[in-house]
Image: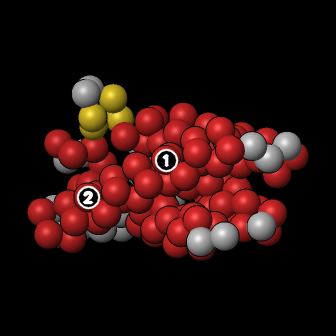
Amino acid sequence: MKLKYYLLIFLFLISLTSSLILTFKQSPPICEGGCDLVQTSQYAYTLGLKNSIVGIFAFALLLITSYLEIINPSKKKRTIIHVGILIGAAIALYFLYLQIFVLKSLCAYCLVVDISMIIALAIAISLWKK
């Protein structure tokens, strides 16, 4: 079971790194235009706050909580992690929909975050079965 939380920590680290890059780099290194279109669209902000900034706080919280769960397991921490993953995966699916069908442009860093959250959901579901 600890291995799955280590995997979640790895996914949250990747997502946190991508969120930091999107927040602090004007034109991220591996993007060829898709990132710019996605990051300057009306969907890049929620309530006036850049989505990547929200991601930094969310992934930092999930990362810390997952680490604490490994050290000292508790139902409360597991609940926070699983609710965060559920919300994050739902948002990831919505953002994937926007990129593919509305904006018709993909941001590599956004895809890293979105796919990581979907993988995290699969791991969380495997934890629920136990």
Q: Does residue 3 appear to the left or right of 41 in the view shown? A: right
- Residue lying at 65% horizontally and 38% vertically, measured from the top left: 76
What is the CA distance from the residue labelled 1 to the residue labelled 2? 17 Å
**Label 1 crowd bin: few (<14), some (14–19), many (20+), radius 10 Å:** some
Where does the image place residue 95, in percent across and percent down from the top left?
28, 58
Where does the image place residue 25, in percent across and percent down from the top left?
49, 44
For the residue pair 59 and 82, the one nearer the viewer reads as 82
Q: Nearer the viewer, mark 1 or mark 2?
A: 1
Q: Mark 2 = which residue?
A: 94
Q: Mark 1 = which residue?
A: 83
Residue 34 falls in image quadrant: bottom left
Q: Which sits earlier in the primary sequence, circle 1 or circle 2?
A: 1
For the N terminus, the image quarter is bottom right
Where does the image place residue 103, in percent across and percent down from the top left?
16, 62
Q: Is residue 106 visible?
A: yes
Residue furthest left as drawn: 102
Where does the image place residue 11, in percent across and percent down from the top left?
62, 62
For the residue pair 96 and 67, the one nearer the viewer reads as 67
User: Helix, strand, or loop for circle 2?
Assistant: helix
- Residue lying at 87% horizontally and 46% vertically, measured from the top left: 71
What amino acid is labelled 1 in the image?
A: Val
Residue furthest top as drawn: 48
What amino acid is labelled 2 in the image?
A: Tyr
For the C terminus, the image quarter is bottom right
Q: Is residue 110 above or below residue 48?
A: below
For the residue pair 29 and 109, the one nearer the viewer reads as 109
For the residue pair 105 and 76, the one nearer the viewer reads as 76
